[in-house]
Amino acid sequence: MRSLNALSELATVDLTQLDQAQLHDRVESKVLLHETDIPAALGLLASDYFVLDHDGERSQRYRTEYFDSPLLASYHDHHNQKANRFKARYRTYLNSDLTYFEVKHSVAGRTVKVRRRTEAPQGRLWPEDILFFYQQTGRDAEGLLPSLTVEYERVLLVRGDYSERVTIDVDIRYFSERRATQHSGLAVCEFKQETLDRRSPAIVALHRRPQKFSKYCMGLASCHPLLRRNRFKQVFRRLDALDVSVENLIVPTNMPELTQ
């Protein structure tokens, strides 16, 4: 990705050093950029942040596979701004072929993520992961079905004192049922902090108004325009202002079916 060439200017950390900033219990805020804004943004952050370098690669390819109820309860809970909600997903780090099952809990403005090492789902939840979901949430995951797959390229930055992570996601592609879309030109920059610090060098340097953005919800809304999406209209307008278009991709033939 050409827009990531500026990464060569940043000092690096490895995975062992990065463990000092896990931040699995955190507050999150996001800003949306056009991909062409990334080189300038990285230049502003170079003096305060390190970039993850894993096996000589400063950007990593991710695949996230979400599971939801047949009526898409997780999607609608998010759309309706339910204060206490969960998401179940598998995350595969494609550069290293490692997969984790993750339970993401949003409550009272915080995000708490727990996970376990597992195998790629192959269209279903593994029994050990169903048990893990129940242990973390008290809810039964037996009826959860594949709902959305998201693939993207991520740059992971960490502040020099390890108090903050900043991720930049580009080349975001969504696959659901027999549909596939992408947000062409979009870069999602996310700040992960123990407590919200609007004076962090990254937030100050980018000087953009925070924007709510869920790859899960925006992916489903993009692939399935008939889904209820009233609360996401402002996000779509922001994408239009950035000159980011929703484009259809060639549809894979092996994607799981979605029940709306």
Image (cartoon, rainbow, N blue to C red):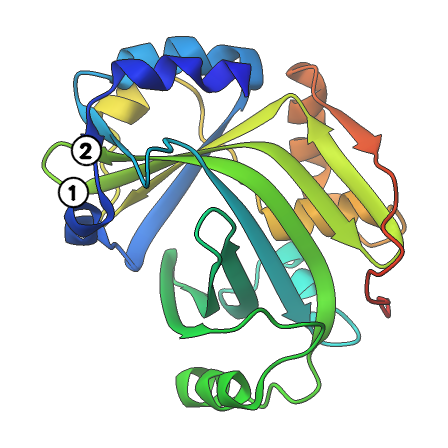
- The residue type indicated by label 2 comes to Arg
| Label 2 SS | strand
| Relative to 60, 244 lies left or right | right
User: Vertically, is 70 above or below 130?
Assistant: above
Front residue of this view, candidates 156 and 99 = 99
Residue 111 appearing in the image: yes
Are dots 2 and 1 in contact, CB under 8 Å? yes
Residue 212's spot in the image, x, y percent?
Answer: 53, 40
Quadrant that contains the N terminus: top right
Query: Residue 163, labelled with which disc?
Result: 1
Query: Residue 18, labelled with which disc?
Result: none
| Relative to 257, 12 lies left or right | left
Residue 43's spot in the image, x, y percent?
Answer: 31, 10
User: Vertically, is 73 above or below 152?
Assistant: below
Q: What number of labels is visible?
A: 2
Q: Which residue is painted at 45% across and 19% down in the image?
A: 4
Pointer 2: what residue? Answer: 159
- The residue type indicated by label 1 comes to Ser
Q: Which residue is painted at 46% across and 16% down in the image?
A: 38
Binning the other alpha carbons within 10 Å of mark 1 as few (below 14), some (14 to 19) or many (20 upward) gives: some
Q: Quadrant of residue 199?
A: top left
Binning the other alpha carbons within 10 Å of mark 2 as few (below 14), some (14 to 19) or many (20 upward) gives: many
